[in-house]
Every structure is written in C-alpha cells, then in structure tokens.
Image (cartoon, helix red, strand yellow):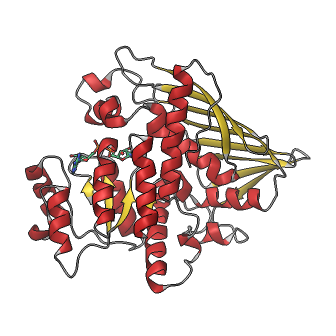
Amino acid sequence: MVGGGEGAYIGNIHRIAARQDGALQLVAGAFDVDAARGHKFAASQGLAADRSYGDYKQMLEAELKREDRVDVVAICTPNHTHFPIAKAFLEAGFDVICEKPLTTTLEDAVALDALVKQTGRFMGVTYTYSGYPMIHEAREMVSAGKLGKIRVVQVEYPLEWMATAIESEGNAQAAWRTDPKKSGRGGSIGDIGTHAYHLAGFVTGLKAQAITADLATFVEGRQLDDNAHVMIRYEGGARGLLWSSQVAIGCSNGVRLRVFGEKGSLQWFQENPNDLLFTGLLGRTELIKRGAGDLSEAAKSRTRTPPGHPEGYLEAFANLYSGFAEAINARREGRAPTAIGQNIPLAYDGLKGVAFVDAVVDSSQADGQPWLTPVAV
Ligand code: NAD
C-alpha cells in the first residue's frame, strides 16, 4: 500500500476490504508522506520492519529484488500523486489498484490507460458504489430490458462536510481537496462527481455523448467548485442530470440513482443500499431485497448474508477487492474470471472519469456552452 497512514481516511477502508474475504494480504507499504510516521504506522499494523518503506520509490526498488515481492500495489494517496506512483509500479511489472479520480490531468489518465494496455498489467480503480450487489442487480435488470429503452437518468452525490471553510481550519483532507495542484481541475465534481458519473454509466450501460455544466463555489475563498450540476446527453437519446455537492447540509453520503425507461424505473439510495425499488407501467412498486433467492449471479456473488442482515459500504468495498483479486488470479491461470471478477472498474473507467471532469470544467468556464464530449478516446 502507498498512502493510507495514520489518520488517513480511505487507506483503512482498503485494508478492511482486503481482509474481509481474504482477497489480499497487506505485506508492505510506504504509508505516509512523512517517512518516520509511516514506519510507526507500519509497525502498528504488524508489518515486518524490512517491508516498511520511507517512500514509494524505495518500496519499488526493494520489492523488485525480493522473490516474495508484492503482487499488487494499492494507491491511497491524494490525487496528484496517483500518476507518478501508478506509472512507476506498472512499468516495473506490478499490478495496481488506484483511487479515483485516476489522475489530475486528462493527459496523464490517457497515458496510464495506454501503459496498462502496453504492459498487460492489471489496474483496478476503486469506484466504491459499483461494488454494491443491488447496483449489479440494477445493471442486470437494465441490460435484460426490464425497464425498456432508457429515457432519463438522475444521479446525485451530495455531501455536507465542506459546507464551511474547514480547509483553512486544519482539516487535512479538505485542504488537499480544495487545492487545484493536488486535487486537479475539479472540486466536488472530481472528488464525488466522478463516482456519480461512473455509477450512472455502469448501471445503464449508456455512453455520454455530450455534457453541459454549471459549477459553483459557495464557500468564500475556496479555489475549486463545491457544487456541480451537469446535464448529460447519452447516445441513443437518453438524458441525464448529475448533481454533486460538498455543501448540501443534511446530506451525509446521499448517493442516489434513479433510472427511468419506457417500461419501468429503478431507484437506489446508498444510505439504504440493501433495497432496490422497481416500478412498472402499472405504477406498482416492488421492493427487491439484497439476498433474495432469485437475484442475478452478479448480485449473489457479492452477497454474504441473508436478507434482513444489513450489508453496506465496507462489504461493497470488499467486493471490489475480491473482484480485483479474482481478475488477477484468473489472468494468471489463463481462465475467465468468475462473476465477482467481472464488471469491475478498470483503468479505462478511471480515464473516462478524468475526461468527464475536464469536459465539465471546460463547459462551465464557457458558461455552459458548447456541449462537450467527455469521452477522450
Ligand atoms: P487522506 O488525506 O486522508 O490520506 C492521504 C494519505 O496519503 C496520508 O496518509 C498521507 O500521508 C499519504 N501520502 C500523501 N502523499 C504520499 C506519498 N507521496 N507517498 C506515500 N504516502 C503519501 O486522503 P483520503 O481522503 O484517504 O484520500 C486519498 C485518495 O482516496 C484520494 O485520491 C481520494 O480521492 C480517494 N478517496 C476515495 C474514496 C472512495 O470512495 N473510493 C473515498 C475517499 C477518498
């Protein structure tokens, strides 16, 4: 692991996810931008002292010399460091799991995606919400035609924690997220809008053809957007509306997806992630519960407990980890991955997210005109 040291947020979620189903074992790391703090943290995790590294370059060099070198490197650092770290490990022949947004520039995202193709290495991108079993069920229902042709996609990711200028009050996580040099061109749109954009495309299978956007910065002195509205025209004529916000007081982690087709609609809300609502033309709403017997293999393979026992965010993240490990093992063994190793977020999905951010910022800076195509390649 690179990053994810003491007090960091997502690194701990990665470690829990890796342990939960035994997908991967943490054996080495360069956990912190401060080497001494990183070593202290590595010791607290029970790592051997010779596998705790002062920085990722030392880790790369030393691991290459070991017979029992790490199989895959999880990058859990702020956005601006993803590119050099991922590039170095991919070029040296390691598989990589990288946080989103994949990079801070489109150029770097294109280069990483090309490097993955060129080296044949694996790169998973942790779009957390695509780990939920009921999101996979929704995806299966859309692709089986249960909703008919899709007309409208409403997706949103509102958060409240940055409703005031906490970046200037010592909040480390908010500080780098509001610094364009570390976060990239997008604020809320890069941090959480990329999750929403991926989720909408993942469930519907629709490709964005053009977008127009309106970014806002409500907190005084903030350098990046903290609220984004994006209209999306999808191939085939469907229309999408995406809202991401870091200033939506009252919304904790309100990821919500609603998909409307000619024959029915689906609704999913991450704060109640075990339930999926389907409404048909007669207006009757069916509650589809995680764990029910007749769900798709895609959903079943990502489920551990019977309906009624809640599973949630940590299990969704563990599903990504199990999927990544399965995809890596299947490639090594020259076989097709089982269900959990299929339909997982990869480098190209990361690239699409960065291309989306770029198009959104360009569109907003041009006052919403013209409509721009976010797909880079
Ligand atoms: P954080 O500030 O809490 O933690 C960052 C960690 O990286 C710290 O331990 C820091 O010391 C370390 N670090 C920084 N530069 C480093 C370097 N060059 N080498 C080694 N370690 C270094 O950040 P966070 O909130 O955990 O976010 C980290 C990444 O995860 C970001 O890209 C963010 O967008 C992403 N993220 C994803 C999700 C998700 O749902 N998938 C959720 C939160 C954050």
Res. 295 in view: yes
Q: Position of residue 11 (x, y in %)?
A: 31, 53
306 lies above or below 230: below
Q: Position of residue 101 (x, y in %)?
A: 43, 45
364 lies above or below 23: above
Residue furthest top as drawn: 220
61 lies above or below 374: below
Q: Position of residue 269 (x, y in %)?
A: 61, 45
Res. 102 in view: no
Q: Residue at x 58, y 64 (%)?
A: 343
Q: Residue at x 10, y 70 (%)?
A: 50
Describe residue 40's horizontal placement relative to residue 170 as left or right: left
Q: Foreground residue, 319 or 123?
A: 123
- Quadrant hosting residue 182: top left
- Quadrant hosting residue 126: bottom left
Is the N terminus in the top left, top right, bottom left or bottom right quadrant?
Answer: bottom left
